Amino acid sequence: MTHFDEKGAARMVDIGAKGDTAREAVARGVVIMRPETLALIAGGRVAKGDVLAVARVAGIMAAKETGRLIPMAHPISLTGVNVDFRLQEPDRVGIQARVRTTGKTGVEMEALTAVTVAGLTIYDMCKAVDREMVVGNVRLISKTGGKSGTFAREDEETWDI
């Protein structure tokens, strides 16, 4: 475990000697809700406004703040963040974040944070009509770049977005 020193104390990994490489990470999650709630989102009839537009901005903002939220994550200069949604009838919104940088460390935590905060934003905007929503199944789908190379989760469908 690289986030602990020889005495077991937590530490931020020194990445100073690492070279810059192009890096990308994709994460996904889901918000499960009542079908009526999904219909409100799809029809743009949620009282607080355009749920997916606000959740998209929240996810992008969260990716940019990951280094401040996760104790051992490095602040990273991101070159791109995309947050996309799939309405999956009858009862869920799929969320995908794609985060890119050219730097010394990967952007997996940024992608996972973007998905999570986008999901929480959907919950927040719809909680008045559905407090039983579940935000979950947040997972890394793929990552490229860096010393550890490429990772791709098996059995995940491709999103054509």
Image (cartoon, rainbow, N blue to C red):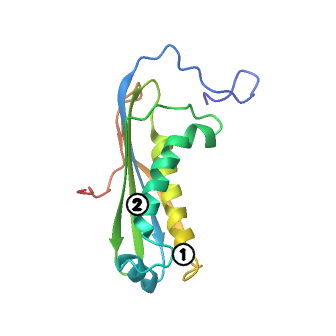
- In the rendering, at what x and y percent does residue 45 appear? 42, 81
Evaluate if marks 1 and 2 touch, with contact meaning CB atoms under 8 Å apart: no
Q: Is residue 3 left or right of residue 9?
A: left
Q: Which mark is residue 107?
A: none
- Circle 2 Cα neighbour tier, 10 Å, few/some/many (<14 / 14–19 / ≥20): many
Depth check, front residue: 10 or 64: 64
* Residue 155 quadrant: bottom left
In this rendered view, identify the residue nearer to me: 103 or 157. Answer: 103
Vertical placement of residue 126 versus 79, above or below:
below
Judging from the image, what secondary structure is the residue with disc 2 in?
A: strand
**Residue nearest the viewer, comparing 128 with 17:** 128
Q: Is residue 159 left or right of residue 12?
A: left
Residue 112 x %, y %: 49, 49
Instruction: Name the residue at 36% across, 63% down.
Output: 85
Tell which residue pokes out farthest to the left in this image: 160
Question: Can see residue 49?
Answer: yes
Q: Which mark is residue 95?
A: 2
User: Which residue is at the far bottom?
Assistant: 36
Please give left or right for residue 146 compared with residue 9 in the image: left
Q: Residues within 10 Å of mark 1 (few under 14, many from 20)?
A: many
Q: Percent x, y for residue 61?
A: 50, 48
Look at label 1 and name its amino acid. Met
Q: Residue at x 52, y 56 (%)?
A: 116
Alpha carbon of mark 1 to alpha carbon of mark 2: how far?
A: 14 Å
Vertical relation: 76 (above or below) 133? above
Q: Quadrant of the N terminus?
A: top right
In terms of image quadrants, where is residue 104? top left
Q: Earlier in the sequence, mark 1 or mark 2?
A: 2
- Tell me where residue 159 appears, x and y as whole percent: 27, 57
- Quickly name the residue at label 1: 133
Q: Secondary structure at mark 1?
A: loop
